[in-house]
Image (cartoon, rainbow, N blue to C red):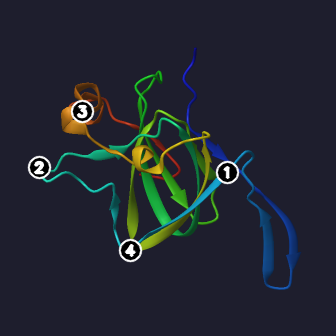
Amino acid sequence: MAVPMFELIPYERFRDTPAVRFFDVTVADSNARDLVIHGGSAVSPPDASDGSWQFYLHAHQEDNLLALHGARTFYLVNLGWNYPFHIVRLETGGDILRIPRGTFHRSISDPDGSTVLNQAVRDQGADVLREFRVYNSAHIPRLFAVTSRTAPLPKLHGCCW
């Protein structure tokens, strides 16, 4: 079975009035809303004390992320993808980033910070504490190998680097 890739999902403007725009940003099947505010160049999850990158991985949750303010850069790793490491830039007014279950991910905000709305799709009975467990890349050899300085470069999405 193929492992689903991340997606960038467009949304639609449905009405304009003087100086006001209306958008439908509904994510089908979303059953949870998380508002995530980063102050300054926040890293989530933060690096380990030894400098190793740390990641989240949700076994029972799909993330659907929309930047409401500022911009954030996401580092996505899925060892089941043909090309496992991607860096995706999410900016205000841009697409919704869908991160499938089983994908390691972390993010870094721009210097002015960012606010992101996550319209998550959580499996029934999902435990939020377990879903937000932090994984240290130094303790997962395949994850560390894919993200190390000697690995092939990640694929970049959403910006001129």
Instruction: Residue 31: give its label.
Output: 1
Question: Could you say whether the residue bearing mark 4 is in a helix, strand or loop?
Answer: loop
Which residue is depicted at the point 24% across and 33% down? 144
Q: CA distance from mark 2 to mark 1?
A: 37 Å
Q: Earlier in the sequence, mark 1 or mark 4?
A: 1
| Place of residue 106 in the rendered image (x, y in percent of width and height, measured from the top left) | 38, 49
Which residue is depicted at the point 47% across and 50% down? 128
Q: Earlier in the sequence, mark 4 or mark 2?
A: 4
Q: Amino acid at mark 3?
A: Phe
Q: Nearer the viewer, mark 2 or mark 1?
A: 1
Q: Earlier in the sequence, mark 3 or mark 1?
A: 1
Does 88 sit above or below residue 141? below
Which residue is depicted at the point 73% across and 45% down? 29
Q: Which residue is mark 3?
A: 144
Mark 2 neighbour class, 10 Å CA radius: few under 14, some 14 to 19, many 20 or more? few
Is 130 left, or right, of 152 in this rendering?
right
Question: Could you say whether the residue bearing mark 1 is in a helix, strand or loop?
Answer: loop
Q: Amino acid at mark 4?
A: Gly
Q: CA distance from mark 1 to mark 4?
A: 26 Å
Q: Amino acid at mark 1?
A: Asn
- Looking at this view, is 136 or 41 the one in front? 136
Q: Earlier in the sequence, mark 4 or mark 3?
A: 4
Which residue is depicted at the point 46% across and 40% down? 58
Q: Which residue is mark 4?
A: 39
CB of mark 2 within 8 Å of CB of mark 1?
no
